[in-house]
Image (cartoon, grey):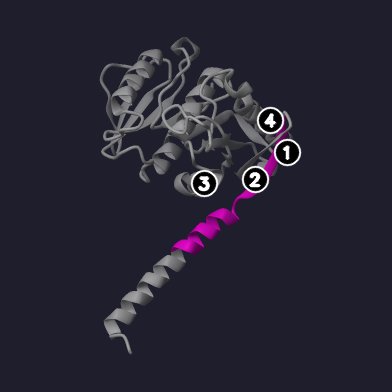
Amino acid sequence: MTLPTYTRRFVFLVFAAALAFANQLRAQDGELARREWTIDGATREALLHVPAAANTTPSPLVFVFHGHGGNMKSSARSFHIHTLWPEAIVVYPQGLNTPGRLTDPEGKLPGWQSTVGDQGDRDLKFFDSVLASLKTDYKFDDRRIYSTGHSNGGGFTYLLWAARGDVLAAVAPSAAVERQPFKDLKPKPVLHIAGEQDQLVKYSWQKDMMLAIRKINGCEEQGTEWDKWCTLYPSKTGTPVVTFIHPGTHAFTSDAPPVIVKFFKAHARP
């Protein structure tokens, strides 16, 4: 049986679109190199994008942490910071199986420690080891080190702000709240991404979190439009807060990565 011309044309277009998408993913993955570290007897890994210039010129450095149950490949594809900021060194670390705060209490899926001291600080040690090895192998700008992540990865970004805040220039957590005492958070530029329909990390929790970090950073009461869905709250100390409030759910929004890059580019550590 011969398919009608319009049907064949539709099938061809669907196939071509699928092939183009697959090629795009392969191209993204092709720019990334897998690397391993051994920490306390455990093998840790990450995908890295390292621009050629990093061999001679100090480059920005961005860490991107996947959510609970995710992986380094999925975070590379959803955040794709390396395609938006190819001049930066970008690290997509892989978490280990760990109990989730809201899901997976038995710890059958990969994620990140929630507090300082949790899981023997294995993920803080991982961050420190990656940073040390990159400093040996490449040139990165100490004043332009950033962290972002979604859900549990956003929570770990908040944890890094609390525990390694002297290293980071700015952070951009998505769909997350901080579990450390707020006293551990020193003023730092923050972009917080939240979905109004988030039923996992409830929007009401995140709303309280955004208000808290505005107070920590000494932000002005009134904000101004900064980008789509974004409000900028200036700070006299140079540590503004941008709230990115989208109408979606807990899922990471595809509108966020360009805004994250824009925010990071605007901030360097004094």
- For marks 3 and 2, the one nearer the N-term is 2
Residue occupied by mark 1 = 137
Q: Type of residue at label 2?
A: Ala
Q: Is residue 205 above or below residue 89?
A: above
Residue occupied by mark 3 = 76
Counting other residues with Cα less than 10 Å from the Cα at mark 3, is it few (<14), some (14-19), or many (20 or more)?
many
Q: Is residue 131 above or below residue 212?
A: below
Magenta residues span: 21-39
Image label count: 4
Residue 163 in sight from this viewpoint: yes
Q: Position of residue 186 (x, y in %)?
A: 48, 14
Say the numbered circle drawn on residue 129.
4
Instruction: Answer whether labels 4 and 3 touch (C-beta < 8 Å).
Output: no
Residue at figure coordinates x 68%, y 30% from the top left: 129
Mark 2–mark 4 distance (CA, rounded to whole Å): 22 Å
- For marks 1 and 3, the one nearer the N-term is 3
- For marks 2 and 1, the one nearer the N-term is 2
- For marks 2 and 4, the one nearer the N-term is 2
Mark 4–mark 3 distance (CA, rounded to whole Å): 20 Å
- For marks 4 and 1, the one nearer the N-term is 4
